Amino acid sequence: MQQFLSKSSSRARFLITAFILLSGISGYIQARSLIKIDGSSTVFPITEAVSEDFQTAKKGATMVTAGISGTGGGFKKFCRGEIDIVNASRPILSSEMEQCRQNGVQYIEMPIAFDALTVAVNPRNNWIKSITIAELKKMWEPAAQEKILNWNQINPAWPDARIKLFGAGADSGTFDYFTEAVVGKAKSSRGDFTASEDDNVLVQGVASDLNALGFFGFAYYIENQKKLKAVAIDHGAGGVLPSMLTVQNGSYQPLSRPLFIYVNAKSANKPEIKEFVIFYMQHAQQLIEEVRYFPLKKEFYDFNIKHLQNKTLGTVFGGEAGMSMTIEELYKRERVQ
């Protein structure tokens, strides 16, 4: 009996000690500021790099969490007020603007970089160096589903072999932008392809199949360029490969696109959110180059800081994708909420 009591007392002391320790950990977690981000997997590498440097600078006082549920998935959470910032590889759409309005969520739109949406094939593919927008449309339009299955159906010079297509999922801003640029209407696409909001899944799919073709953000291509081959895009003046030069001079069309973050205006009242966004804009140029996207001029990051401080609300796109626009043109347009 005495031995049993002794064991019970030891167990009780252990439970009490564990409770005290867990309470302390919980209190520590609650004491830390938390910034919640979700959205585009294309923008994720930029925000991840900024977040890591910011958390280091804050010495752990602020924790940043970032998910990759896709631009559409991110906006759903954002417009429900569940996250502070959404990463977006396209502008906010009319339906999302309405959802935000209904939930009383106001936002500050911030272009942060340019991306060259990249069409890639397996490096062992020796028959395709460039592709026209018309050929891409024939490959990806809804009418192609279960009908356009082989390479030679797109171009007779290409082999009689089954195409394996990989592309962004329906919740991805990359899917919206690609389908509008190529097919002519956002979300208008064949459905019989391997889809994912995670670009790494698409990269691995293309890298492992001779007959594969896929599309994703430039950073994912350049990070895996030994396993992939970029296809030049022919928009009527010959094939153009994605690069810093072709994005800056406007020749890589129509697959050059701006990338964004959207900041919840209510969240922006919190000191840690404001500090994070300012840190983001002050370090964006260097970090964006490091993760292989194309930064804006410093003046545009300064504009973003002004918009944060002045609470400049709404979007300059009016609920549409805004194809082939320069950043200079964006900052001259009126904002709507």
Image (cartoon, rainbow, N blue to C red):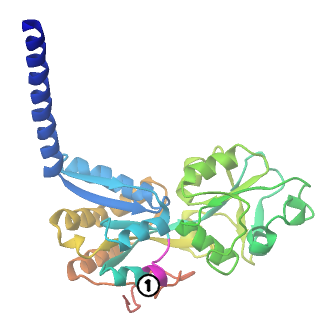
In this rendering, the count of numbered labels is 1
Q: Which residues are magenta?
A: 90-96
Image spot of residue 227 (x, y percent): 65, 44
282, above or below 126, in the image: below
Q: Tell me which residue sits at (49%, 56%) in the image.
A: 292
254, above or below 18, in the image: below
108, above or below 17, in the image: below
Q: List the residue tagged with mark 1.
A: 330
In magenta segment, residue 94 = yes
Image spot of residue 37 (x, y percent): 35, 61
Image quarter in which the N terminus is found: top left
Asked whether 221 or 15 is in front, the reply is 15
Asked whether 175 or 122 is in front, the reply is 175
Name the outermost residue toward the front: 1
Q: Tell me which residue sits at (21%, 78%) in the image.
A: 309
Q: Tell me which residue sits at (76%, 63%) in the image.
A: 130
Image spot of residue 221 (x, y percent): 59, 53
- Mark yes or no: residue 238 visible: no
Going by the numbered disc 1, the residue's amino acid type is Leu
User: Residue 136 sits in which quadrant?
Assistant: bottom right
Image quarter in which the C terminus is found: bottom left
User: Residue 298 sits in which quadrant?
Assistant: bottom left
Asked whether 212 or 77 is in front, the reply is 77
In magenta segment, residue 54 = no
Mark 1 lies on a secondary structure that is helix
Horizontal side, residue 14 vs residue 250: left or right: left
